[in-house]
Amino acid sequence: MTELVTLSGDTAVTTTLAISEGTGTQHKNVLELVRSYRADLEEFGLLAFETRPRSPGQHGGGSTDYAELNEQQATLLLTYMRNSPIVRSFKKSLVRAFFDMAQRIKMRASDPMAVLNDPTAMRGLLLTYTEKVISLEQKVAEQAPQVATLHRIAAADGSLCMRDAAKVLQARPVDLRRWLVAHGWVYQRPGHSGWLAYQERIQQGVMCHKVTTVQREDGTDKVVEQARITPKGIARIGAELAKAAA
């Protein structure tokens, strides 16, 4: 016998299978009624269609498609069915079943230990937990590139030149340089081969300049200014690159 009302997460639901059995109506006709009035039913929440294996020996084998309905949807659907004695009797049974489930939910809220003695509530609780685990696993998978980037950044000590920053970000130096230019992080002065950081980026703390003195072949000194990316800048670039690759 199909269970009349169960928990789907924290919501009490019945199924087209239960309605079919309780009203003596062929399941395909109940499903057809659901699909015909889907727009009406979804005014009270999205319809959830599920699949379950047919019972051993059941005609046709394979699996059965069915729909889950909350209390409002089930009540509305039954108003669209012919009001025969069996349908009226089932309506009363369904009202009682939804009321009993509401009482169980209240009891569970006030006494969490009561869940252990309620198989239906336990199934609902486990379903909710499973859904949360699946959602968490998906989030972890989505955030894996960002996490890997943060680990690489944590290993970086101080500001880095563009070539070393590219290694940390696992990007080609030429691709990183193009990204920095395209997003307004660095520029070149006319007639100079070196790269300089925009003042705005320096103020944001994502870029800085390192000034070094090198000796020319003739023995004179030359001051060289190098644009470098700070750990904060690498973190921001890493997040943007990971987002673009997602």
Image (cartoon, rainbow, N blue to C red):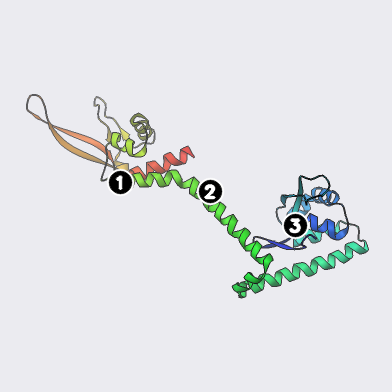
Relative height, residue 81 to residue 169 (above, below)? below
Q: How far apart are the alpha carbons under marks 3 and 1?
A: 53 Å
- In the rendered view, does 95 fall on the left or right side of 181? right
Question: From where the camera sits, is residue 131 visible?
Answer: yes
Q: Position of residue 187 (x, y in %)?
A: 31, 32
Q: Are marks 3 and 1 in contact (CB under 8 Å)?
A: no
- In the rendered view, does 47 fall on the left or right side of 187? right
Query: 219 and 135: which one is in front?
Result: 135
Q: Check the image and name the residue furthest to the right.
A: 84
Query: 118 and 6: which one is in front?
Result: 118
Query: 208 and 191: which one is in front?
Result: 208
User: Which of the two discs, 3 and 1, labels the residue nearer the N terminus?
Assistant: 3
The residue at 87%/52% (across/down) is 26
Relative height, residue 168 to residue 2 (above, below)? above
User: Which of the two discs, 3 and 2, labels the residue nearer the N terminus?
Assistant: 3
Q: Position of residue 206 (x, y in %)?
A: 32, 44
Residue at which label 2 appears: 138
Q: Which mark is residue 13?
A: none
Residue at which label 1 appears: 155
Residue at which label 3 appears: 69
Q: Tag 3: residue type?
A: Leu
Q: Tag 2: residue type?
A: Gln
- In the rendered view, does 14 fall on the left or right side of 204? right
Q: Tag 1: residue type?
A: Ala
The residue at 91%/57% (across/down) is 82
Callout 3 secondary element: strand
Callout 1 secondary element: helix
Q: Position of residue 2 (x, y in %)?
A: 78, 59
Q: How far apart are the alpha carbons under marks 3 and 2?
A: 27 Å
Q: How far apart are the alpha carbons under marks 1 and 2?
A: 27 Å
Q: Quadrant of residue 86?
A: bottom right
Q: Are marks 1 and 2 in contact (CB under 8 Å)?
A: no
